[in-house]
Image (tube, rainbow, N blue to C red):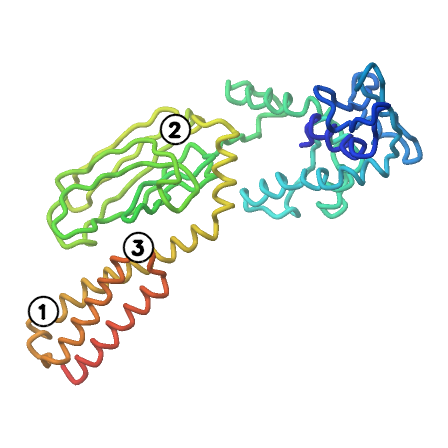
């Protein structure tokens, strides 16, 4: 969407630096004055100009800038389109975002409806048509009223009103942000991905991170970042009474239910004991403004590379911790431990110690952690060679 304020500033800025009043004062430094396009028939001149033939010039007129002096200038449609080229192209960004979120190619779009007064600008219409392979745009609806039409149709569907036009129409809300729980290492474990149609019911199995762990806390978050600290906490609950067992063996089925009213219910159940706990969060969907949601999505895109590095490090760290736990059990077991030569066992223990040191270093990279795991593996293979 091209906003009137931005359009006017973009259109008038080139004149600020080149035009001066009789007092030689730069227009850009004139306080509390703004060079604005004149309006025609109540429609901003920026739109009117674009609708006229390219040869036609439009007048830019200001309110008095200095000591009662006015300023005016002419601009062609070609110049208008050149000045606003970057802004016009930016209108395709939300189109690309919607298609990406919907996992849909532009070829699968059935119809292209123009929304908003700025879509009257011929250059914007040309860009949109070109983006969709030169397809014809649907201009049957007034762009200023398109949103109101859509809202009216949705209101009719939600209130159970049916007609020939709406009887086969299905309108679905979606989760604007991903929903999930915090895992070990402040990692966001997504259960309901962003843009999932609601109502929905999705489950994911989590587990314990310590031996004989009988209680697990489930902090519930929404957001798009890899680390929970960068997302929004919605609430938390505890599941108690988990039977003691080795870490990683418990199966905790975590279910997210979102109803049509945005009510979120999160539950966790231990498969072995049947013990269950849950939390209900009112209006979990829709509690943030559109601006806040957009900002969280932009942040996720901006820090995408940093989040990938964090994910890679966390995965390498988890793999190394699990492998250390496994190897420690191997070299102390009666079946293997008693058969290891003292020097070979000491070498494995030394590699384990080095790996544990790497785990303690907060900024260890994923490659360093993988290298530490490889060192343990090689030492163990050498120590157990020939043992049956």
At which x and y percent is residue 101? 54, 43
Residue at the spot x=86%, y=35% of the render?
77
Mark drawn on residue 362: 3
Left or right of residue 215, residue 300 in this image: right
Quadrant in the rendering for residue 117: top right
In the image, 350 versus 115, the foreground residue is 350
Q: Secondary structure at mark 2?
A: loop
In the image, 160 versus 154, the foreground residue is 154
Q: Which residue is mark 2?
A: 284
For the residues carrying marks 3 and 2, which lies nearer the camera in this image?
3
Residue 224 visible in this rendered orientation of the protein: yes
Please report whichever mark, 3 or 2, sits nearer to the chain's N-terminal start: 2
Residue at the spot x=26%, y=38% of the render?
218
Looking at the rendering, in which quadrant would you find the C terminus? bottom left
Disc 3 crowd, CA 10 A, few/some/many (<14, 14-19, 20+): few
Distance between the alpha carbons at the discs numbered 3 and 1: 29 Å
Residue 115 visible in this rendered orientation of the protein: no
Please report whichever mark, 3 or 1, sits nearer to the chain's N-terminal start: 1
Mark drawn on residue 13: none
For the residues carrying marks 3 and 1, which lies nearer the camera in this image?
3
Q: Are marks 3 and 1 in contact (CB under 8 Å)?
A: no
Disc 1 crowd, CA 10 A, few/some/many (<14, 14-19, 20+): few
Q: Which residue is mark 1?
A: 332
At which x and y percent is residue 12? 78, 30
Disc 2 crowd, CA 10 A, few/some/many (<14, 14-19, 20+): some
Q: Is residue 348 above or below residue 60?
A: below
Q: Is residue 108 above or below residue 237?
A: below
Quadrant in the rendering for residue 215: top left
Looking at the rendering, in which quadrant would you find the N terminus? top right
Q: Is residue 158 above or below residue 194?
A: above
């Amino acid at each position: 969407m091209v906003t009137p304020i931005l359009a006017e500033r973009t259109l008038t800025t080139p004149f600020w630096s080149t035009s001066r009043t009789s007092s030689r004062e730069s227009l850009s430094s004139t306080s509390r004055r703004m060079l604005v396009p004149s309006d025609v028939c109540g429609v901003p001149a920026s739109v009117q100009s674009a609708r006229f033939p390219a040869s036609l010039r439009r007048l830019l007129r200001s309110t008095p800038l200095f000591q009662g002096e006015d300023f005016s200038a002419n601009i062609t449609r070609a110049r208008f389109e050149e000045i606003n080229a970057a802004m016009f192209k930016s209108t395709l960004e939300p189109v690309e975002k919607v298609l990406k979120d919907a996992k849909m190619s532009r070829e699968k779009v059935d119809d292209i409806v123009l929304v908003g007064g700025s879509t009257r600008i011929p250059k914007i219409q040309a860009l949109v048509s070109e983006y969709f392979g030169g397809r014809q745009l649907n201009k049957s609806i007034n762009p200023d009223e398109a949103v109101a039409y859509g809202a009216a149709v949705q209101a009719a569907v939600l209130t159970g009103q049916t007609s020939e036009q709406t009887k086969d129409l299905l309108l679905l809300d979606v989760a604007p942000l991903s929903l999930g729980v915090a895992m070990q290492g402040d990692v966001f474990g997504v259960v309901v991905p962003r843009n999932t149609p609601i109502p929905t019911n999705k489950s994911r199995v989590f587990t314990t991170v310590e031996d004989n762990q009988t209680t697990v806390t489930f902090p519930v978050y929404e957001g798009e970042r890899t680390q929970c600290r960068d997302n929004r906490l919605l609430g938390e609950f505890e599941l108690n009474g988990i039977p003691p067992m080795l870490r990683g063996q418990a199966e905790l089925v975590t279910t997210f239910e979102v109803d049509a009213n945005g009510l979120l219910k999160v539950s966790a159940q231990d498969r072995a004991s049947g013990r269950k706990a849950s939390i209900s969060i009112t209006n979990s969907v829709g509690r943030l403004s559109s601006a806040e949601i957009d900002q969280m999505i932009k942040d996720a895109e901006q820090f995408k590379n940093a989040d990938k590095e964090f994910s890679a490090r966390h995965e390498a760290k988890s793999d190394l911790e699990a492998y250390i736990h496994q190897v420690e059990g191997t070299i102390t077991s009666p079946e293997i431990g008693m058969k290891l030569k003292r020097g070979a066992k000491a070498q494995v223990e030394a590699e384990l110690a080095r790996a544990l040191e790497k785990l303690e270093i907060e900024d260890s990279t994923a490659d360093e952690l993988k290298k530490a795991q490889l060192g343990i593996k090689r030492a163990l293979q050498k120590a157990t060679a020939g043992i049956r």
